[in-house]
Amino acid sequence: MKKIGKLHVLTDTILQSRFSHQDIARLAIAGGADTIQFRQKTGSTREMIEIARQLRQMCVAAEVTFIVNDRVDVAIAAEADGVHLGQDDFPIPLGRELLGKDLIIGGSAGTLEEAHKCLAEGADYIGFGPVYHTTSKLDAGPVSGVDLLTQAVESIPLPIVAIGGINAENAPEVMQAGAHGIAVISAVCCHENPEQATRILSQAL
């Protein structure tokens, strides 16, 4: 049984520079995150692999799921639990060929059409959004809103992880809409106390 978590914390060192990927992962795990997603868009592949391997060790020790954003090669090299792939990233079917049937593949969707595409291509879960306005992801599409999230939950037989502008205040609304869980970046990474921020989100769920 694949372990699709309910509180996904994406590590980031672009929106903030106080904390490293390793710091964010450690603090988020301490705060109750059950999934860590390594997200780095720039830099050398060697550096990404080294960081990813360190994050994986932390996650294994804490029995937390470890996902790599976008980079199938880094996920394989780090022996991650899986990858998360956007609409314009590595194709999900090809990712499945390389990763095998046992590893997790998440797909991003901002519309019902994209969500159904992820389902048809073999994703294990769908990151749906942005549900609310977000400044964390510059290429995020238009806000989908809670109503569209509800439609995705009702029409897609996969865990739906809501993303985009989610915080402790609106997380309950997202969960009431039927989401399996939430994924956050700035709500944890840009908080002065990432561990406390994660704990508050965990309690809100």
Image (cartoon, rainbow, N blue to C red):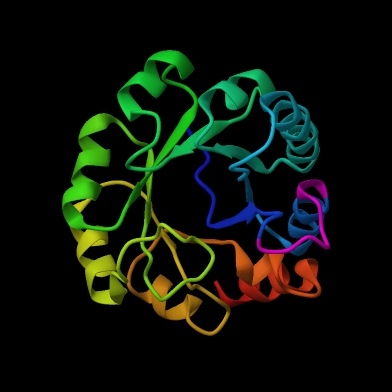
In the rendered image, which quarter is residue 77 located in? top right
> Vertical placement of 101 versus 126: above or below?
above
> Vertical placement of 23 versus 143: above or below?
above
Q: Where residue 9 sits in the image (x, y, percent)? A: 62, 56
> Vertical placement of 197 versus 77: above or below?
below
In this rendered view, identify the residue nearer to me: 42 or 52: 42
- Chain part drawn in magenta: 15-22
Residue at 39 percent of width and 60 percent of height: 140
**Residue farthest toward the bottom in the current orientation of the protein:** 169
Answer left or right for 205 relative to 40. Answer: left
Q: Where residue 75 sits in the image (x, y, percent)? A: 59, 26
Q: Where residue 105 sits in the image (x, y, percent)? A: 43, 34
Secondary structure character of the magenta stretch overall: loop
The quadrant of the image that shows the C terminus is bottom right
Q: Where residue 139 sits in the image (x, y, percent)? A: 41, 57
Answer left or right for 15 relative to 71. Answer: right
Residue at 47 percent of width and 18 percent of height: 99
In this rendered view, identify the residue nearer to me: 162 or 5: 162
**Residue farthest toward the front in the current orientation of the protein:** 43
Residue 1 highlighted magenta (yes or no): no
User: How many marks can you see?
Assistant: 0
In the rendered image, which quarter is residue 52 located in? top right
Residue at 27 percent of width and 40 percent of height: 118
Residue 20 highlighted magenta (yes or no): yes
> Vertical placement of 38 versus 94: above or below?
below
Residue at 34 percent of width and 36 percent of height: 123
